[in-house]
Image (cartoon, helix red, strand yellow):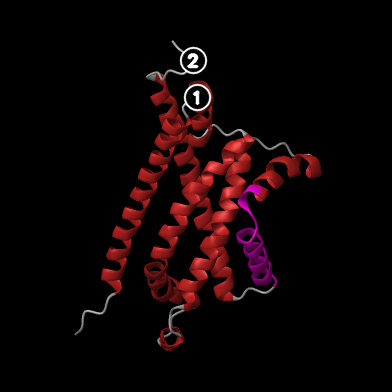
Amino acid sequence: MRYTSFTSYDLVLLAHGLGVSLALFAVTTLIGLLIGTMWAVIRFYRVPVLTPLVSFFAELLKNSPVLVQLFLIFFGLPALARINVTPVEAAIITLSGNTAAFIYVIAVAGIESIGRDQIESARVFGLSRWQILRHVVAPQAMAFAIGPLTGLLVNQLQVTSLISVIGVVDLTKIGNILNLRTLKPFVVWTVVGGLYYVTAKLIALLGARLERRLRAHTAWKGL
């Protein structure tokens, strides 16, 4: 085998790297959705002390570079708190927090898009705050937020490529390994970029389909 040749095993390596990227993307998205939604609920209920803390952390996370956050978790925690963090753990913590911050902003915008008259009407009919959140606020906020959320998820998929710098063997890391071995950067990075593009396109299509279904359910159809 020549130093610059490709092998069939390279396809296995690319598939493995893509699987790692998608797995981390899925895990951090779920964690981010949970945390970001919880933060938005805290903001909705205006919980004392917690509300300003949530706003502060969200602003800090969404307005600072993800790579810096990644370095702080991976290199800073062991040095400051004597906590050993693996590359995968650092990636999950960083990407989950960053995703949560943006989901919080999207969720808050979705909640605030709902007219106060609807909430006041629900209160008149005797609905509790939890019932208002579940039956009035949440369905409409989801329909409003699915578009921005899809754009965020596509962006967060691209952001996962940064975790290769701390040693996570994701798709970008595999691309770098193949580039060094084959010395064919144009071919390697075209394939890697194509895989990211196809995956992002699938996410965008699924998001658009879900948005159409949600808006169809919430659209006024007349009497």
Left or right: residue 59 compared with residue 151? right
Is the residue marked by circle 1 packed among few (<14), some (14-19), or many (20+) residues within 10 Å?
A: some
Residue 172 highlighted magenta (yes or no)? no
Label 2, residues with CA under 10 Å away: few <14, some 14-19, many ≥20: few
Q: Nearer the viewer, residue 172 or 168?
A: 172
Check contact, mark 1 vs mark 2: CB within 8 A. yes
**Point 37% across, 51% down: residue:** 203
What amino acid is labelled 1 in the image? Leu
Which residue lies at the image location 65% right of the left edge and 57% below the top edge?
64
Q: Across the whole image, how many numbered discs are drawn on residues?
A: 2
Among all residues in the image, which is located at the extreme left?
223
| Residue range corresponding to the magenta coloring | 49-67
Q: Quadrant of the N terminus?
A: top left
Looking at the image, which is closer to me, 78 or 124?
Answer: 78
Image-quadrant location for residue 6? top left
| Residue picked out by circle 1 | 183
Assign a secondary structure to mark 1: loop
The first of marks 1 and 2 along the sequence is 2
**Residue type of the residue flagged with mark 2:** Tyr
| Point 44% across, 61% down: residue | 149
Relative image position of residue 21 (x, y in whole percent): 48, 39
Q: Residue furthest top?
A: 1
Residue hosting label 2: 3
Question: Quick check: is 54 in the magenta stretch?
Answer: yes
